[in-house]
Amino acid sequence: MLQAFVDHLRHAYGSVERLNELWGLTYWSHSLSSWADLWSPDGNTNPGYDLAWRRFQSSLTTEFLAWQARIVREHRRSGQFITHCLVSGHGLPAADRHAIAQAVDITAENIYYQAQDALALPAASGGGDGAGAPSWLGDTGAWTLYLKADIGRCGTRPGFLVTETNALSIGDAHSNAPPYDGQWRLAAYALIARGARGISYWHWHTCHYGNEAYWQGILNHDLEPGRCYQEVSRVGSELAVHGDLLDGIEPDADVAVLYSQDSRYALAFQPPLARPGSAAADRTSYERIFNAFYRAFFDAGAQLAVVHPAQHFERFPVLVVPALHIAGDDLLRRLVAYAEAGGHLVLSFRCGYADEHARARWARAPGILREAVGASYQEYANLAVPLGLTATDGLALPAQARATAWADGLEVEGASALASYDHPHFGRFAAVTTHRFGLGRVTYLGTLPNRELGRAVAELVLGQAGVRPPWTDLPASVRVTGARATGGQRLWFVSNWSWDPVAVPVPADGAALLSGRGVRAGAALELGAWDVDIVTEP
Amino acid sequence: MLQAFVDHLRHAYGSVERLNELWGLTYWSHSLSSWADLWSPDGNTNPGYDLAWRRFQSSLTTEFLAWQARIVREHRRSGQFITHCLVSGHGLPAADRHAIAQAVDITAENIYYQAQDALALPAASGGGDGAGAPSWLGDTGAWTLYLKADIGRCGTRPGFLVTETNALSIGDAHSNAPPYDGQWRLAAYALIARGARGISYWHWHTCHYGNEAYWQGILNHDLEPGRCYQEVSRVGSELAVHGDLLDGIEPDADVAVLYSQDSRYALAFQPPLARPGSAAADRTSYERIFNAFYRAFFDAGAQLAVVHPAQHFERFPVLVVPALHIAGDDLLRRLVAYAEAGGHLVLSFRCGYADEHARARWARAPGILREAVGASYQEYANLAVPLGLTATDGLALPAQARATAWADGLEVEGASALASYDHPHFGRFAAVTTHRFGLGRVTYLGTLPNRELGRAVAELVLGQAGVRPPWTDLPASVRVTGARATGGQRLWFVSNWSWDPVAVPVPADGAALLSGRGVRAGAALELGAWDVDIVTEP
Amino acid sequence: MLQAFVDHLRHAYGSVERLNELWGLTYWSHSLSSWADLWSPDGNTNPGYDLAWRRFQSSLTTEFLAWQARIVREHRRSGQFITHCLVSGHGLPAADRHAIAQAVDITAENIYYQAQDALALPAASGGGDGAGAPSWLGDTGAWTLYLKADIGRCGTRPGFLVTETNALSIGDAHSNAPPYDGQWRLAAYALIARGARGISYWHWHTCHYGNEAYWQGILNHDLEPGRCYQEVSRVGSELAVHGDLLDGIEPDADVAVLYSQDSRYALAFQPPLARPGSAAADRTSYERIFNAFYRAFFDAGAQLAVVHPAQHFERFPVLVVPALHIAGDDLLRRLVAYAEAGGHLVLSFRCGYADEHARARWARAPGILREAVGASYQEYANLAVPLGLTATDGLALPAQARATAWADGLEVEGASALASYDHPHFGRFAAVTTHRFGLGRVTYLGTLPNRELGRAVAELVLGQAGVRPPWTDLPASVRVTGARATGGQRLWFVSNWSWDPVAVPVPADGAALLSGRGVRAGAALELGAWDVDIVTEP
């Protein structure tokens, strides 16, 4: 494997002298005299090496799957298709979701979630009540279902399959949290609303032996129908009636969030953030920043898409770019052009800091983005304790808004400061800036916003960009997303993530598919505890 | 060793096909084609394999000790006896206390405890002030002395030796907690009261070198008599006077707690509980459940015995069965018969769930026990946060009573619910049920009770079973246990686990051995701080 | 390496019989029959072995550096000198600072510190706001700058070089904490005041690649002058003016703290303390006790020196000896003689407990020191929870004073108890004693003082020893230390570790060098936020 990597490097870079230069190997006397000098990845400390190695691993995965797909394609019957599950969320360390999506017919995800109180909206402060959730799940909360689906919708077509999701309970023998009545159905329609073309449950019945003997199926060990069976059956019955309409829908999306696999690799190797309440490095810094920005716009009511640099993100009115630490000049110039042409570009700290070889750029940060941002910085600090903020221009800040984890030493150069830090030292720096640039606008966050700050900035951005949430005056527990059916009908998925029944004001006449009732503009759609309906406009 | 294990399996199961079936090896493609396919225990993920391996390891230990004992027996002189220390508490991973006890003349235990505030009764909330206790000690508290002795009393005869216990201090150089004045004596009489036939202290003087240079002896490094020497001498002087009467006593026991080595093995491999406040598996789940049930009855004033399936537990009016996850049909039927014949059977969650091959049973849980319990469940959940309870029938619940860690989805089928959960979802399930069955009764706890819930249920059970604590109206810091001397006299060990002196109402005329005073029914026995006396009835 | 160690042992001890005796190898059946029996250090459990091994490792380091220095000396030009950085603080595991100092021309240290709020005086309770500080830094706070310099000043001459210190930020990519304006200058003059002859910053500009790409230099990646450049330039400009006067100064020191490399080794192997709030051993017990005692006297306003047994500590009026666990009879007798001749000897628990082979002494503790201390103990305990204290004689105890982590069972034998424990058991023991002995005095602390207790005892000791802080009535944020210039002038370094400006009463006429103003006795020296000045007496 190391030899294959060396061959790859030789082909890509030509000479060890070039590698010495690009990776700065003179530092700590690591310069190579010949290709035979290259060390193995174990214990490597050089960020340029690490990034190349991770890309190489990832390309091997893609190549292997593409080779397998070619073989299968020679033998498949008509109507058969090739898929592959991409795990879910931010995925596996050595796999590039967008690249793999090009090699299969339809992508698939295993979308697991923490049920029970963790799904409540509005979430309990601190990120949702995910106590007891398996650590491999990462963040918890209703928003993670949307995030995982929006990440999964990454192929050339807007749909994907859910190859596994929660049946009775997930995880090891000590992680049992069966959903409350209604939660399975809520989860199913959230996934369908965001592009799932099929949902499979893991699995039919709980195994009686083996490592996963307590990863519980639709039936448990007694093989008798129980609560999960009844709930899943209800979804199945509804889909038997409405499946044709729901098949092939295209979810709405006004806000795109740019995913950078390279930046994820680089920030896992040299994480900019410490784990909350700790002095240890947070190797999930990229995921943490990405999720905070996704969630900020989710909380503001936006409908999101996750896009990759290879995709045409220019079509979205708002483009959010979290932690784009690794980027070549071309991609950065494309972001500048996007704003100049009228887009609203939202950037986080670390964007544009390093080049495609993981070298910190020699220019004042954020480098190529500096003029568009209208601000720059020469230093930055980690925030062990969150800082309060002073809003300076048009930003409605709730009292709980905080800057966390990081603060760029941001000095405005044409931009307007939206918020600054309440602090004798950091007070000189802007925390959030916005800059009219060309026909568009660039908003920059020099800090990791807590939920209140993130939502406030997102609401301001959506307002400035003219993006309106689909329905208004929603109860805090209700989420609405739209989609267009293949026949052109508009669909609204209206869900209530709470024990408390709600009445949701409906903006237009139509029909509530699941309850089978008509709805009228201005009247209320009634939803029970953990309930969902689909409103169609004729 | 692996070869010996394979030989054992071949002998026990006959064919790989049988193993494939019993262990469900088709899952994850682990099926064996020949005995040579069997993997080594490192990294094994199959629970059936693990249980067989642990039993095999344990049998090797027993065989080795039995072989050694046979050799020594050929050479011993008259009056010499063979013993072996079984560590204490739940013991070593690969040793079966009851099996080893059959191979020696008298069993022995090394009973260490956390001294100082951890010994106070009533214990500080949260399980006793065991801050700073070595982690190998496990639970702390006065009750652990009784637990360890009751576990130690497992041979064919009711006595055992204490081969090691606390002298000045135990553990590594950073774990010094010398007992307060009186605590050595309290501990000694607690052990004697529960069957100790001899007590040795580790050790005579602290070593001046070596790994245990700060595991402190009766004399410390200065070799001069100090506080520990004086306290131990006092016990010795008393035993010189009263030893004949105390030798060979049989401790009272009304409540038996069934110990399942197999369940301990299985729940260490696939633990049902998470560590408190964590999402990580608690590999001591069996010990935690067992101890919670032992302690519930201890707190209710019961006198306990720990019994093994091979023993005649039918003679006890109350039989407590914690976490009997692994059990063959015969043992479960024997439990049913015990209740039917008039016993009060107390079961915890996980009882009867898997068979003797660690396979989850195919029947609605608790399977063979279902009819006797009068309730069943199809699902269960971990409780990351304790739940409050509503008492529904005859159970006096203190306000602090909580269900912790686990909740079976228990539905009554003839039983009465004693308590249910205060929760919009879990509220539909019973937390504690009781069921008149045949001439007896079955009480079932679908949750891990906190101390207040455990004690309340235990008091109800004792009352229903007609088991009365030996003395009544005891101060909260006082513990009384009874025993019968070889000459037939009744002995009452009365101890005060507190800095505050107490006056204990005496139920009958007699004599206080240690203080040398007579006592009269209705009068008070005076005990000082951390003091103990033995009352004899003539 | 093991063979070299065996050769060393053979040479040092002569026979395995002698080693068996000195290390107590009969325990756990470790006796050696021949040199070939000796095990390797991995997994060794014997403290005598460990101490010998650590000393051997350390001597190899010294020998290697001395050999390198001899080679370089043969080739150096006139004016060139040999130095070697000794890391800083308590240094590396296998290096003896004092021994290495004899082999080079001038010692050097890499003195890093946590900037921002951690530098504030008075420190936030709990040891300074060091949240987010890299764990390799150890303790944080302004006092650690003085400690590290006082440790660094260990050669035969009073000066040392600072080969590395904080530029813009230190540590990994997630540990960014650039100093506030003024803090670089405060740190520079603190180091100069305590003997630094030169200060180099790490490093000129931040690297663009490599492992330390976010260990930030005077210039950051943009290579443009920024805040750090300006601040360091200011120090440079001042030194260009005043450097001649500051070069070669000798810092004042009234209180010596004895450093025992052997005790550090031994207490890392068998730590007497548990980590705060934990039952795990604190392998930095020596550093923790040493720092607590250094800081107690720092907080009391003393000027300190760190001395080694090979140095002439008898010249100091106060000698503080923390955790001298390992000491031969000669060193202990020298301490006794120091007090007898008029010195004030301050001892902590564990002093004099073991001999030079790590054997606990056979005498009542503190052994050879017992008569001079005027008190002894036979037992000791760890304190999982801090204890309050009652002052009994002349000690002014603030309400927050606490005994932490450890309590000797100290009984007075001629000494006066200064404080005892508020506790039903520990109340019988003295916590702090003082004893007039010969012409001097011995103060003994049987516990690890928290900051308030430490400072109160240190103030009492300084008063009794006639050591007066150089300036009086200082604001709580101000630190003053003195030095004598090579020309004989007295210099006072006056620094303000706070955002709040202060007026400092000046005791004598003179000149403020950095602000260029004259000062008069009784008038005030004005200092801004994080400001410093140097007052000269003519």
Image (spheres, coloured by chain):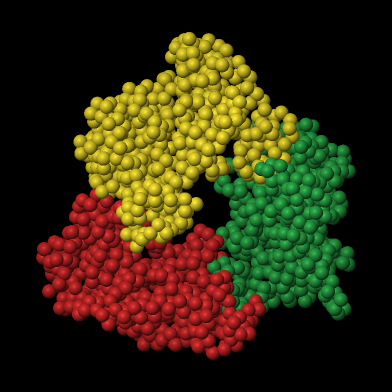
Chain colours: A red, B yellow, C green
Looking at this rendering, what residue extends furthest in the front direction?
A: B74
Relative to B105, residue C40 above or below: below
Residue A63 point in image, percent of width and height: 39, 80
Question: Quadrant of the image for the C terminus of chain A?
Answer: bottom left
Relative to C152, residue C325 above or below: above
Residue B130 point in image, percent of width and height: 53, 39
Q: Nearer the viewer, residue A48 or A396?
A: A48
Residue at position x 61%, y 85% in the image: A34
Q: Nearer the viewer, residue B38 or C267?
A: B38
Residue at position x 41%, y 84% in the image: A335
Residue B467: quadrant of the picture: top left
Q: Is residue C333 left or right of residue A518?
A: right
Q: Is residue C151 left or right of residue B386?
A: right
Relative to B268, residue C193 above or below: below
Residue at position x 47%, y 30% in the image: B155
Residue at position x 20%, y 75% in the image: A248
Q: Let me know if residue C11 appears in the view.
A: yes
Residue C505 point in image, percent of width and height: 74, 57
Residue A62: quadrant of the picture: bottom left
Callout count: 0
Residue B125 point in image, percent of width and height: 46, 37
Q: Nearer the viewer, residue C293 or A266?
A: A266
Relative to C62, residue B397 above or below: above
Q: Is residue B114 left or right of residue C336?
A: left
Q: Nearer the viewer, residue B38 or C189?
A: B38
Looking at this rendering, what residue extends furthest in the bottom direction?
A: A14
Q: Let me know if residue A216 appears in the view.
A: no
